[in-house]
Amino acid sequence: MMKKIDHIGIAVPELDAAIEQYQTLGFDFDHVEEVPEQKVKTAFFELGDAHVELLEATEPDSAIAKFLGKRGPGIHHICVEVDDIEAALAEYRAAGVRLVNEEPVIGAGGHRVAFVHPKATHGVLLELLERRSTDAD
């Protein structure tokens, strides 16, 4: 069901400053994108076949703003790519896995995503990502 780790999401209070710091560390900057549905602005860095995603809240009631308020900056989630997000969610629901999203939502890049609750994964927020069919592997 899972293909690979797609990215690691890191919550940051100031995206521009974090981008500069990650570039100083040698990470290969790719692009910035705003995801209004998630109330977040993201910056992606390529890292081999995976990415590092920096996340800045655009609204004080966003999940990232709440995370930063509770825990401060740091790793927010791990994202894995799946072939069929509907099938993955159905399998998890059937197994009684606690989900944040019962149905997929639109995330960065226009991809369909859904989150598995951290209580189901020993404290790690897990994002499932199904790439748009027009994207290459």
Image (cartoon, rainbow, N blue to C red):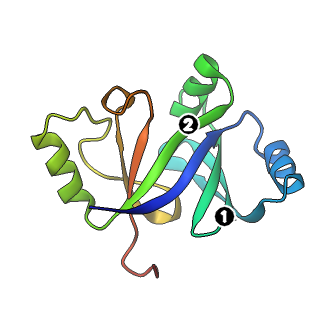
Residue at left 65%, top 33%?
74
Image quadrant in which you'd find residue 57: top right
Work out whether 19 lies above or below 111: above
User: Viewed as shown, does residue 76 lie left or right of 122?
Assistant: right
Work out whether 15 lies above or below 80: above
Residue at left 35%, top 33%?
121
User: Viewed as shown, does residue 81 lie left or right of 60?
Assistant: left
User: Viewed as shown, does residue 118 lie left or right of 21?
Assistant: left
Indicate which label's residue lies in the foreground, 2 or 1. Answer: 1
Work out whether 89 lies above or below 75: below
Image quadrant in which you'd find residue 134: bottom left
Please state the horizontal and vertical placement of residue 87, each as a whole percent of the image: 18, 58
Residue 101 appears anywhere in the view: yes
The residue carrying mark 1 is 47
Residue in front for this viewpoint, 110 or 118:
118
Q: Quadrant of the C terminus?
A: bottom left
Question: What amino acid is labelled 2 in the image?
Answer: His
Residue in front for this viewpoint, 44 or 47:
47
> Does dot 2 land on a helix, a strand or a loop?
strand
Please state the horizontal and vertical placement of residue 25, each as a whole percent of the image: 85, 52
Instruction: Residue at the far top: name it.
Output: 70
